């Protein structure tokens, strides 16, 4: 995993948005995997700014969201469909029919989940998946104990997640108990993942995700098996990482490489560094 540590969430979000924008410019019809929650908000704000000020063009982009609460209509203010409309889709030129969020009110979830997976495949797979981490180490709603090979399905929320999200619903008892979520296996099939975490309350989960063992008890740790994950953390979320110095060395080498200063790296031609 490539680890990029930024001084604060704002700088980290700008960095994340740059990865997304670079992809959209390189591949205008790319497929983005999107996340909700407080973590990606700064990234979405920056993407909206890039659209308005720099003409970043979403007109051919397709999106798939990770998850949705079960029981909430798409127009419910706390539904993830609403979150995406309010925080990104309504402010850029993405085509509404190219945006996909699981349906929390599907009549037949088994069929709906299968079709969601199929649609991702039909669109050519996800090029770049944005991810946050739950304080219990989950990615999407893959709570501790989820199979690392899991696919899109219904999932029961862990009490920690319900507690974390109670602030949006005005109380724990109002938080839905179930969600429909992409599985860990679904996420691992995306071509590239951007893993974001900000704040001291994420430090333990980041440490376990990046430097702990791969375990279903911390589903984000499965990302260690993925070939291209970029973790972008602020100082507070990265503070428990033991190999911070090494990650900084890698970033320095990467900057030299991107600046074409190959001789300083002792190499004669362009190649990637991990
Ligand atoms: P947050 O949630 O971004 O609101 O902290 C992240 C998550 O639960 O995946």
Image (cartoon, rainbow, N blue to C red):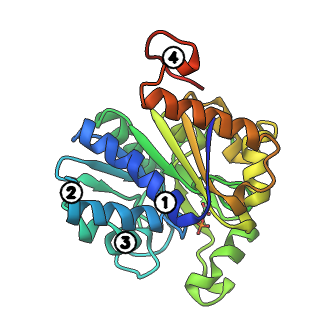
Which of pointers 3 and 1 indicates the residue nearer the eye?
Answer: 1
Mark 4 and mark 3 lie on one chain; the one further toward the N terminus is 3
Side of 70 relative to 105 (left or right): right
- Residue at 41% x, 82% y is 77
Q: Is residue 116 above or below residue 171?
A: above
Rendering coords of residue 89 (x, y %): 28, 66
Which of pointers 4 and 2 indicates the residue nearer the eye?
Answer: 4
Which of pointers 3 and 2 indicates the residue nearer the eye?
Answer: 3
- Real-space Cα separation, disc 4 to disc 2, in angstroms: 48 Å
Side of 83 relative to 231 (left or right): left
- Real-space Cα separation, disc 1 to disc 2, in angstroms: 27 Å
For label 1, the residue is 13
How crowded is the residue under tag 1: few (<14 C-alpha within 10 Å), some, or many (20+)? many
**Residue 180 visible somewhere in the drawing:** yes
Asked if disc 1 and disc 2 are in contact, CB closer than 8 Å, the reply is no
Which disc number belongs to residue 42? none
Secondary element at tag 1: helix
Rendering coords of residue 189 (x, y %): 49, 33
For label 4, the residue is 263
Which of pointers 1 and 2 indicates the residue nearer the eye?
Answer: 1
């Amino acid at each position: 995993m490539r680890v990029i540590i930024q001084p604060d969430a704002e700088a980290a979000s700008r960095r994340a948005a740059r990865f997304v924008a670079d992809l959209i410019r390189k591949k205008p019809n790319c497929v983005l995997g999107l996340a909700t929650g407080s973590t990606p908000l700064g990234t979405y704000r920056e993407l909206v700014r890039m659209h308005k000020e720099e003409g970043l063009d979403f007109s051919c982009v397709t999106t798939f969201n990770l998850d949705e609460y079960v029981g909430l209509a798409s127009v419910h203010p706390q539904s993830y469909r609403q979150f995406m409309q309010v925080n990104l889709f309504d402010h850029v030129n993405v085509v509404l029919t190219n945006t996909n969020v699981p349906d929390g009110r599907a009549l037949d979830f088994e069929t709906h989940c299968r079709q969601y997976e199929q649609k991702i495949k039909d669109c050519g797979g996800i090029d770049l998946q944005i991810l946050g981490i739950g304080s219990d180490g989950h990615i999407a709603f893959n709570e501790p104990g989820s199979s690392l090979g899991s696919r899109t399905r219904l999932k029961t929320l862990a009490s920690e997640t319900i507690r974390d999200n109670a602030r949006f619903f005005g109380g724990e008892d109002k938080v839905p108990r179930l969600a429909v979520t992409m599985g860990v296996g679904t996420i691992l099939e995306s071509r590239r993942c951007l893993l974001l975490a900000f704040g001291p309350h994420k430090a333990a989960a980041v440490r376990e995700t990046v430097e702990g063992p791969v375990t279903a008890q911390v589903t984000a740790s499965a990302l260690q098996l993925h070939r291209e994950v970029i973790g972008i953390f602020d100082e507070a979320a990265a503070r428990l990482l033991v190999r911070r110095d090494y990650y900084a060395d890698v970033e320095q080498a990467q900057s030299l490489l991107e600046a074409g200063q190959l001789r300083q790296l002792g190499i004669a031609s362009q190649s990637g560094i991990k």
